[in-house]
Amino acid sequence: MRIDRSTKNRPAAISTASLPDIVFILLFFFMTVTTIKTDTLLVANELPIAEEVGLIENEELIIEILVGRPSKELSKLYGDQPAIQLNDRLAKIEEVAPFVLTELSKKPNDIRNKVIVSLKIDKKANVGLVQDIKEELSKINLLKVNYATLEGPVHKN
């Protein structure tokens, strides 16, 4: 009778039965903690601080316009003057109304009259540009304007 001694010295095989569970746990973890970045920030956008802040619950009602100085990479092309960012591109003041009308047409019919234009304005941007944006919005009779801010004590501005 022959005894195979080589199998006696082998360590027991590691069970891989729990490996799929670990993989799925990691997958769910990354799915829950990961955020999807929708727009690239092309302008500096340090929001001012306000004490009385309200929250718009339905984000579907919002059309965002960002204002600020172009980022370091883009400042070589566009200079240091505050610029307007519409979605993922820099735009001129004349392009604001067509952009807002295009975004408004993408919204469902039942919420079009409730849409709010949210202006995310860098605290170092000049007021003249903001006034120009408001005039463009008033030309198309879109008068619901929101100024995005951070909540906190005002003296930190």
Image (spheres, helix red, strand yellow):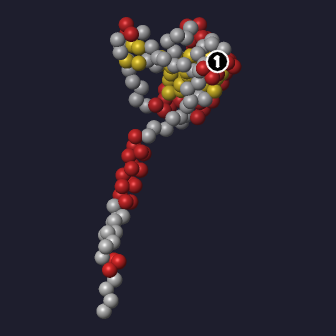
Q: Position of residue 116 (x, y in %)?
A: 50, 23
Image: 24 above or below 51: below
- Residue for point 56% across, 30% down: 40
- Residue for point 60% across, 32% down: 105
- Picture quarter containing residue 142? top right
Q: Amino acid at mark 1?
A: Ser
- Picture quarter containing residue 19? bottom left
Left-right relation of 14 to 45: left
Q: Nearer the viewer, residue 120 or 73?
A: 73
Q: Residues within 10 Å of mark 1 (few under 14, many from 20)?
A: some
Image: 88 above or below 3: above
**Residue hosting label 1:** 75
Q: Position of residue 66 (x, y in %)?
A: 55, 21
Left-right relation of 120 to 90: left
The residue furthest bottom is 1
Image: 90 above or below 37: above
Query: Is residue 139 something that shows in the picture?
Result: no
- Residue for point 58% across, 16% down: 69
Q: Nearer the viewer, residue 78 or 72?
A: 72
Query: In the picture, which quadrant includes the N terminus?
Result: bottom left
Query: In the picture, which quadrant includes the C terminus?
Result: top left
Image: 64 above or below 49: below
Q: Nearer the viewer, residue 113 or 1?
A: 1
Q: Position of residue 72 (x, y in %)?
A: 60, 20
Give the number of marks. Answer: 1
Q: SS class of the residue under badge 1?
A: helix
Query: Is residue 102 something that shows in the picture?
Result: yes
